[in-house]
């Protein structure tokens, strides 16, 4: 009997139709204070946890504060999707209707990247000179209520 230098084995067949289902449960995380721009700590200086609902809300705010393509880790080539919004491009527009439409599109696209987002809608806009303020709703899957976000 001849000893083989390298062992051989059969490669198993892979069922290409099998799709991995994305985990859509809301995961707890470290609490983030968007006003301070830092993690929340308790009186002993330990990081405070947040539940899945609060973590998702903070994720939404972070996506709205991140300019798409501004960080290498957020570019599709590296992360699998382009994360963030395109507000710099919108700031160059002068027509109010165009600006509102572009804001609605970029916010919706940014938040629907997350499979936990059921829908983004009910946008309303108010103008103060050249400044625009936006309010809209986000509904996560398996929630009865929506999140009201002012931007």
Image (cartoon, rainbow, N blue to C red):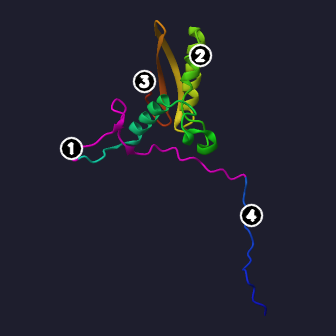
**N-terminal-most mark, 1 or 2:** 1
Mark 2, residues whose alpha carbon is within 10 Å: few (<14), some, or many (≥20)? few
Establish if 98 lies above or below 120. Answer: above
Q: In which quarter of the image is the C terminus?
A: top left
Q: How crowded is mark 3: few (under 14 residues within 10 Å), some or many (20 or more)?
A: few
Front tag of 3 and 1: 1
Q: Do the residues labelled 4 and 3 touch (CB within 8 Å)?
A: no
Please, what secondary structure does the residue beneath circle 4 have? loop
Give the label, 4 or 1, closer to the camera.
1
Q: Relative to the observer, which residue lies in front, 97 or 143?
A: 97
**Taking 31 as reference, is 72 left or right?**
right
Q: Which mark is residue 64?
A: none
Mark 1 neighbour density, 10 Å: few (under 14) some (14–19) many (20 or more) = few
Q: Mark 3 points at which residue?
A: 148
Q: Name the residue under label 1.
A: 43
Label 1 with label 2: CB-CB less than 8 Å:
no
Q: Can residue 104 be seen at all in this image of the molecule?
A: no
| Residue 65 position within the rendered picture, expressed as x and y whole percent measured from the top left | 47, 29
Residues drawn in magenta: 17-44
Above or below, 144 against 20 in this view is: above
Residue drawn at (54%, 33%) of the image: 70
Label the magenta part by its dominant secondary structure.
Answer: loop
The residue at which mark 4 appears reads as 13
Secondary-structure class at tag 2: helix
- Screen quadrant of the N terminus: bottom right
Is 79 covered by the magenta stretch?
no
Distance Cα–Cα, label 3 vs label 1: 30 Å
Which mark lies nearer to you, 3 or 2?
A: 2
Q: Mark 2 points at which residue?
A: 101
Q: Which of marks 3 and 1 is nearer the N terminus?
A: 1
Q: Position of residue 110 (x, y in %)?
A: 55, 31
* 123 to 17, vertically: above or below: above
């Amino acid at each position: 009997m001849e000893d083989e230098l390298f062992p051989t084995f059969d490669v198993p067949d892979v069922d290409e139709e099998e799709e991995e289902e994305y985990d859509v449960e809301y995961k707890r995380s470290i609490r983030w204070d968007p006003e301070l721009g830092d993690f929340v700590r308790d009186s002993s200086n330990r990081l405070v946890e947040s539940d899945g609902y609060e973590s998702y809300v903070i994720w939404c705010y972070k996506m709205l504060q991140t300019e798409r393509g501004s960080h290498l880790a957020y570019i599709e080539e590296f992360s699998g999707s382009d994360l963030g919004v395109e507000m710099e491009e919108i700031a160059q527009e002068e027509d109010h209707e165009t600006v509102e439409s572009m804001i609605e599109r970029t916010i919706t696209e940014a938040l629907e990247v997350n499979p936990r987002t059921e829908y983004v809608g009910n946008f309303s806009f108010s103008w103060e000179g050249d400044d625009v303020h936006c309010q809209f709703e986000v509904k996560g899957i398996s929630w009865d209520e929506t999140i009201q976000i002012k931007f």
